Amino acid sequence: MDLHEAEPARDPRVRRTRAAVMQAVFDLVSARGTTAITVSEIAELADVSRRVVYQHFGDLDTLLLETGLDLARRELLPRLADLREPVDGRAETLVLARHFSDNRVFYRALLTGSCAFALDRGLIRLMLPLNRHGVAHRYGDKLSPQAIDDLAAFITGGAGSFVTTWVVDGAPDPEAFTDRLLSVISLMMELR
């Protein structure tokens, strides 16, 4: 199962510039704990012009969103893809919890900022195939394809909301969070 979204082929210089700009966003947001940063600050830290930032990303909210999704694509999805078939979901959930715990300051700022809704939707889109695969693995012969899609969407959205609440308000203990999330999902699955 391929969890990576295909990135359009780009000139290596373009990729380096985009990476430098997104790294600058990550560094600034993580250092300050807020998305209240300026394009000028980003451009200066990335060693590019403001014009280049706007040409690549359009506006600050798009840049924040792309940086958050890029972090998940680069760091979270490969770790999840490295895991083999899900047995009970604990390994996947723990990888997810550790990723958000390790980057809590950054994600907390984004999930409470102006790009929060778009980031939430984007993260759900990234995680939906994994959850669809897990539901199909567990219930494939008992559920219709539509029911598999619906259940995966329900779990992904609910888990996404749970993760957001934990990142924004909770104590970043990935082990305890993993146990809580799996307990809720298990209870929900038993209510059928």
Image (cartoon, rainbow, N blue to C red):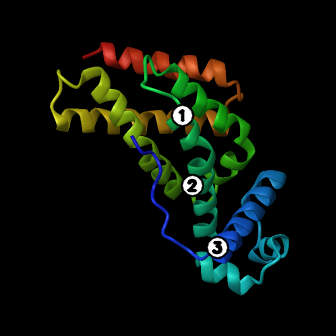
Q: Viewed as shown, does residue 154 lie left or right of 170?
A: left
Whether residue 117 is situated above or below residue 190 in the rendered picture: below
Q: Which mark is residue 82?
A: 1
Q: Nearer the viewer, residue 168 or 80?
A: 80
Looking at marks 3 and 1 on the same chain, the residue that comes earlier in the sequence is marked by 3
Callout 3: helix, strand or loop? helix
Q: Nearer the viewer, residue 137 or 39?
A: 137
Callout 2: helix, strand or loop? helix
Q: Which mark is residue 168?
A: none
Read off the residue under disc 2. 69
Callout 1: helix, strand or loop? helix
**Residue density around tag 2, few if under 14, some if 14–19, many if 20 or more, within 10 Å:** some
Q: In this view of the protein, can residue 143 be seen by the observer?
A: yes
Q: Which mark is residue 12?
A: 3
Residue type at tag 3: Pro
Q: Can you tell which quarter of the image residue 18 is in?
A: bottom right
Q: CA distance from mark 3 to mark 1?
A: 26 Å
- Name the residue located 45 percent from the left edge and 42 percent from the top edge: 127
The reply to whether callout 2 and callout 3 are in contact (CB within 8 Å) is no
Residue type at tag 2: Leu
Whether residue 97 is situated above or below residue 184 in the rendered picture: below
